[in-house]
Image: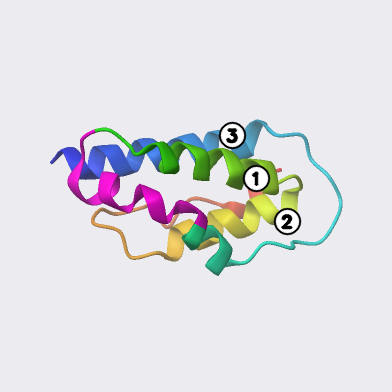
Amino acid sequence: MAAPRGAAVVLAMVLAAMVVAPPATVHAAISCSTVYSTLMPCLQYVQQGGSPARGCCTGIQNLLAEANNSPDRRTICGCLKNVALPYKISPSVDCNSIH
């Protein structure tokens, strides 16, 4: 039961940071493979719970630094919605509302 909560915390942190970031008008340059590889250090935390690895926190920080415009943040949102996680992410999350 701890793993889904931990994964939800990681996802919530990423999405919250994307929502509060200032909007920009450029095209997305980030790919889902970049999102997945950047967040790979979080996998053990997501699956087993406990404390996130240092690489997980660094990966989230790096991902947020790369997501410096609305299209990138929307792409990340879509990637996170489509990944196979051990818990449900609401399909009602509107990635287009992220700026």
- Picture quarter with the N terminus: top left
Residue type of the residue flagged with mark 3: Ala
Residue type of the residue flagged with mark 2: Pro
Q: Distance from label 2 to label 3 (Cα)?
A: 14 Å
Q: Which residues are magenta?
A: 38-50
Instruction: Identify which residue, 76 or 96, lies in the foreground.
Output: 76
Depth check, mark 1 against mark 3: the one in front is 3
Q: Distance from label 1 to label 2 (Cα)?
A: 9 Å
Q: Callout 2 environment at 10 Å: few (<14), some (14 to 19), or many (20+)? A: many
Does residue 15 sit above or below 82 in this rendering? above
Does residue 83 sit above or below 87 in this rendering? below
Task: Name the residue tied to disc 3.
Answer: 17
Q: Quadrant of residue 61?
A: top right
Instruction: Identify which residue, 62 or 70, lies in the foreground.
Output: 62
Q: Earlier in the sequence, mark 1 or mark 3?
A: 3
**Residue 38: percent from left, percent from top:** 51, 54
Depth check, mark 1 against mark 2: the one in front is 2
Residue lying furthest front in this view? 54
For the point 66% across and 31% down, which residue is it? 20
Q: Earlier in the sequence, mark 2 or mark 3?
A: 3
Badge 1 element: loop
Residue 98's disc is: 1
